[in-house]
Amino acid sequence: MDDKSRIAQLEQDLQQANRKIRELENANSIAGVETVRSLSNNLLELKESVIDHLHHPVVILDCDLKVVFANQNFCKTFKTTSEAIVDRLIYELDISQWKIPQLQNVLEMILPSGSKMNNFEMQVDGSNGQVKHLLLNASKIKLSDQNEHCILLSIENITKRKIAQDNLKKSQQQFHDLFYSSESLIAIFLGPDHIVDMANDAIIEVWGKGKDVLGKPLLEVLPEIEEQGLVDLLNHVYETGEAFHASEKHVSLTIDGVQQDRYFDIIYQPQRDGDGNIIGVANISSDVTNQALLNEKIKKNEAQFRELVNLIPNKINIATENGDSFYYNKNWLDYTGLEPEELVNKGWLSLVHPEEYIHLDKELSQFKEQGREFEFEARLLNKENEYRWHLMKSVPVKGNHTISSWITSCTEIQSMKDEEVHKEGFLKLVSHELKTPVTSIKGYIQLLQTVLPEKIKTDSRDIPVKPYLNRIESQIERLIRLISEMLDLSRIEQNELILELSDFELNKQVETVIEDLSFSHCEMQIDIDHEEHIEIRADRERIGQVISNLITNAVKYSPDAKKVSVRIFKTQDNQAAVSVKDYGIGIALKEQQQIFKRFYRVSGNNDDTYEGFGIGLYLSNEIIEKHQGKITVTSEPGTGSEFTFLLPLNQSQ
Amino acid sequence: MARILIVDDDQTIGLMLKDILEFSDHKVTVSQQPKQTKENIIKNDIELILLDKLISGVDGTDVCAELKADPEVAHVPIIMMSALHNVGELCKSVGAVEFIPKPFDMDTLLNRVTEVLARDKSGESASS
């Protein structure tokens, strides 16, 4: 029983006692009056004792609002003593809180009107600066032994309750805001019929059945879900108290008579009352239709992609950004005879031939760091324990500028490699077979050149034997050059062009080449300008080949000119340079980029054809590039061309 | 003048070499049988051999290595020749003193032969 009830009870007892006294007085029963009076006195003592022990500060005032009695709690709360305040006006006590005109007015009103004051709330400033909330209750009582009325004033400190109430209000507001303004779809269903008790705007909009949904059973609001198992789920939550979660749950809603497929992430949470009994189910969902449709599309695309990846004859694997492959297509599995998990655990690198692996391992990490696509050839072990050549290409897949994965495609090139070996063997044979007769011819011509006289006299005329032999020899040299070019080409293609480096004088090599060429091009004057004396480290024969090629071209494409100029110099950035300038047909600008390509040949004005395979400049360019050098050309049609090759100089120079 | 043995399966090349070398006053024996090389050396008291790299399916380098391993004939210098590419180093590694790529200039051939004979002679005189 709380204090208020106790006071009320006491008052009731008191009034009853007073009534008894009056009745007895009326009956003139002295003895009875005394008995009741003593009873009443006892009750008063009891009353004061009870009041004294009440939890709230309670004070009894006389009709002048002077303190008659103050309970312990009053003295304690207002830090005073009973003696100090008895017989003093309540609002004149030395207690700052009481000097409140409002209170004085209220109390003064009670006396004349005889009314009660119930739950009068007051705010007073506490000593620590915090606002204190007090609840005052006052009632006029008449004590039996006194004619005048007294006032019983109880003061309750409700500050804590007030704060708690404020907090509750605040959180209620927050809940309200959260509930109604949330983008999540929230509704609370009560009872076994799932009556819609609360539903926020978001869910009402998704339901599409208008705003008038509260108080209705869910199935009345959404009859279309009856066959979709949702009500069974709600029933289950309601009956068992087990929450239900689902992602991308498909729900078919009928909006304006049109069926719509929607997807929701759903939580059904049981709702309980204060005693823990289930009273309903809260539905917290979010509409993930767009995402679900996208996922479905992605799944479909992925299925198509997998089909595609298995359809093409290549082996395809996908790796993380770190290079760990997590997917291998069917061709990989067929080739290796391994299960997907085995292959993922082993990794394809373990199937690479040790010879390629040494280089590959290094290169792979380099390219991975740089995030560049790369291509390489390697032998891979198959299920028959045979290594077969593959061409592999790895491409980074970028998302948001960072690499998310690597796709590697492997094409088996074993037959190509086999053919290369055959071709190589064939070229070696061709080379050998062609060179053998040429060797004999050349040997005999040179022998004849040595043994025969300049002319042979016959009966009728002189035969110029030497010039004839010279012409044959020059054509043999040309044939030898063509054979060499053809072989060089195949060597370059197989990356077999190996440089034999040595230190030599560039000027001397140029002179030697010009000397050799002068025999076969005696009608052409080849000038040489030694601007600098240069020593380089390079493949002497190959550089000679380049010089020879440039001069031969210069002569070949200058049918009407008499001169070719060769210059040896150093560039400003200290590179060795040899330029060959002719005064021939020249090369159009658009052709200048093409001439270093294989089999490209410049044609003359009248579509004249010029001898050769069209690989001389290609070979020269390859040779110079192998030396870390560069060939350039400047030319004007009808005026002539100047080819220059640059080579890095020895460190010491 | 020296006694020279030519081992080459191409008859024309053999004859051409013989003609050129005889023109330079050498005494030349031509053989197409690599297996009879040792016999030929001894029989003709050969001072220099011109050996082709590829003779009727037999690898000239094997022949060269065999001769160099045989104390009876190891002293005879061998010049190897070939129309194959990049085999010069290989030939020298099995004991050939020189390698001449085919086709060659007559002057180159004669110069090499003279050089090798001169070197061989001075080596002989130095060791004796």
Image: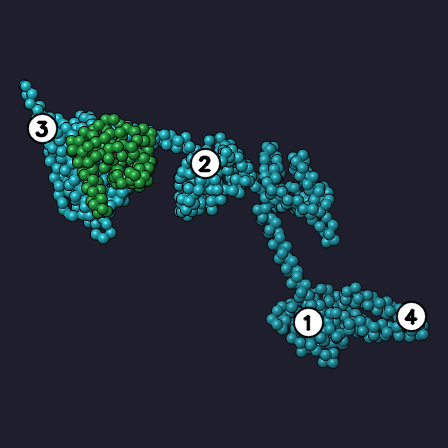
Chain colours: A cyan, B green
Q: Position of residue A201 (x, y in %)?
A: 60, 45
What is the residue that sits farthest to the bottom in this orientation? A83
Q: Position of residue A191 (x, y in %)?
A: 72, 44
Of residues A441 and A88, the one nearer the viewer is: A441
Dot 4 alpha-carbon crowd within 10 angstroms: few under 14, some 14 to 19, many 20 or more: some
Q: Are marks 1 and 2 in contact (CB under 8 Å)?
A: no
What residue sits right under mark 3 in the picture? A453
- Dot 4 or dot 3, earlier in sequence: 4
- Dot 1 or dot 3, earlier in sequence: 1
Quadrant in the picture for residue A253 = top right
Quadrant in the picture for residue A295 = top right
Q: Are marks 1 and 3 in contact (CB under 8 Å)?
A: no
Of residues A572 and A254, the one nearer the viewer is: A572
What residue sits right under mark 2 in the picture? A387
Q: Are marks 2 and 4 in contact (CB under 8 Å)?
A: no
Q: Position of residue A310 (x, y in %)?
A: 50, 32
Q: In this rendering, which labeled residue sits more in front, label 4 or label 3?
A: 3
Q: Give the structural element (helix, strand or loop) at label 1.
A: helix
State which quarter of the image contains the N terminus of chain A: bottom right
Dot 2 alpha-carbon crowd within 10 angstroms: few under 14, some 14 to 19, many 20 or more: some
What residue sits right under mark 4 in the picture? A24
What residue sits right under mark 1 in the picture? A104
Q: In this rendering, which labeled residue sits more in front, label 2 or label 3?
A: 3
Q: Which residue type carries mark 4? A: Leu
Q: Give the structural element (helix, strand or loop) at label 4.
A: helix
Q: Which residue type carries mark 3? A: Pro
- Dot 2 or dot 3, earlier in sequence: 2
